[in-house]
Amino acid sequence: MSTTEATGQQSSAPNRAGGANVVPQPSSETQLTKNDTSSREIPYAALESTIPFLQNPYRYISETCQGLGSDVFYSRLMLSKAIFMTGPEATALFYDQSRFKRHGAMATRILNTLLGQEGVQTLDGDPHKYRKGLFMKLMSRENIVKLIEITNHWLCAYANSWAAMPEVVLYEELHEVLTRAAFAWAGVPLKPDEVKQRIGEVAALFDGAGAVGPRHWRARQARRSLERYIEGLVQEVRNNRFQAQEGSILEYFATCKDFDGQELKLHTAAVEILNMIRPTVAVSVYQVFVAHAIYKHPECCDKLNSSSEYLHAFVQEVRRFYPFFPGLMAFVAETFEWKGYQFPKDTLVVIDIHGTNHDKRTFAEPETFNPERFVKYDDKSNAFSFIPQGGGDPNIHHRCAGEMITLDLMKLTARFFSSKVSFDVQDASSLEVDETRVPALPRSGFVIKNVRYKFLNA
Ligand code: HEM
């Protein structure tokens, strides 16, 4: 049954942008505006957006907004009323912590896979600020350089074997590189007989979280297994039965105090240690896109090697151009009005990441890959218009704690593929990016062949 049939109303506008059909306001039960003449009604898009959002995760919100001529629309997500928003102004609103709260907003299926229960992402107010501070202390230059050096070691070790392989599934190889690096960096032992298992489990957390079916169930099982393993290690560190590496992430979360002055709960400590390991391995998605962009734009290689400013601009453009997370969710903390639209308390609000990074008002020709746009770009004054890893200030808001790590890992990868090795793609279909899966990826995980070192021991 179509939306129009369900509401018994006529569609008022053709579906210009390919987003949800635009239909008149439904019954008063679903209206989100109060009877106040100063209020405008939030444009209504569809009775239920769950399926179209899952089918077109990166473009559904922006295309629907375009069709409605509005940065905001409402509908339902998993049967709950939801307001969807796109663009820099809406992003600035989304990061107003007096208006939105995160606790309870994240879908259980994402908490049980990608994020874990009771981690920093689920906190608000002072407990969030305190816990976030614990993460930000780990982002010292010294600590980041340590991770980059370990990753470089494993990247070179793996690449040595790629030359002899008829084809290389780059995404899978990079999971191995980054899992080995992240575990070593975090001080979490990788037992020789469990290496393959742990690599598969960490990848499943971010690769299967947004999926439906077996890929998702594997992610749930992986979270249970990894949390059990790390909880055991934290317990042993606390009982002095395991000597954690001094200054390691394992030692840090096993011994630090939470906002209430107590040690982190065992489970929470494991969740937060995984909050360092999992996203580090997830950078494999961006590494694949770095290789993809270098292959498609070989003219960038010289500049990547001669200019650190261009290298920075290049990886910023990769983060803008390629999709990763479709959106973020929060609940309205207290009813408020914005631009005449009423946002009722406890309504779910979804902000559009990919659409905001492709907003024509900020980025001219957004569908063109153009690193030059980030040369002389001021990251700080664009905290709400360029949001691949969230917006605002990471010390205050929920914005990603690991952007410096992400950028440095991407730069390592860009230098590696532009100066040290060359490769061909298996066939043209390897270059197609599948945007129906989350995270999006070139088909088959980017299959490359004929990998050659440009300089021995370079
Ligand atoms: C593939 C690269 C990455 C992407 C696309 C990414 C993306 C994001 C996004 C979208 C958020 C949520 C922002 C919000 O809720 O407002 C986030 C939060 C977070 N990220 Fe990342 N991230 C990446 C890498 C990393 C790395 C390398 C680390 C640490 C080693 C990290 C640690 C965190 C933490 C701890 C949070 C929670 C922050 C909070 O709730 O206050 N991320 N990330």
Image (tube, grey):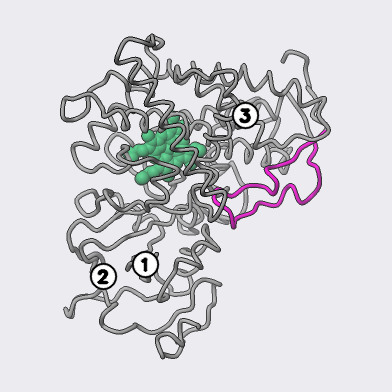
Instruction: Give the quarter the ligand 1 occupies.
Output: top left
For the point 44% across and 44% down, which residue is it? Answer: 113
Q: Residue 193: x and y, percent?
A: 60, 21
- Label 3: few (<14), some (14–19) or many (≥20) C-alpha neighbours in 10 Å: many
Q: Residue 235: x and y, percent?
A: 33, 20
For disc 3, the marked residue is 413
For disc 2, the marked residue is 341
Residue type indicated by callout 2: Tyr
Disc on the earlier residue, 1 or 2? 1
Q: Give the side of residue 399 with respect to residue 158, left or right.
A: left
In the image, which residues are magenta?
424-449
For the point 37% across and 48% down, which residue is it? Answer: 384
Quadrant location of the C terminus in the rendered image: top right
Disc on the earlier residue, 3 or 1? 1
Q: Residue 381: x and y, percent?
A: 37, 42
- Secondary structure beneath dot 2 equals strand
- Label 2: few (<14), some (14–19) or many (≥20) C-alpha neighbours in 10 Å: some
Question: Is residue 439 located in the magenta-colored stretch of the structure?
Answer: yes
Residue type indicated by callout 3: Thr
- Secondary structure beneath dot 3 equals helix
For the point 18% across and 25% down, which residue is it? Answer: 262
- The count of marks equals 3
Asked if the residues shown at circle 3 and circle 1 are in contact, with their CB atoms under 8 angstroms apart, the answer is no
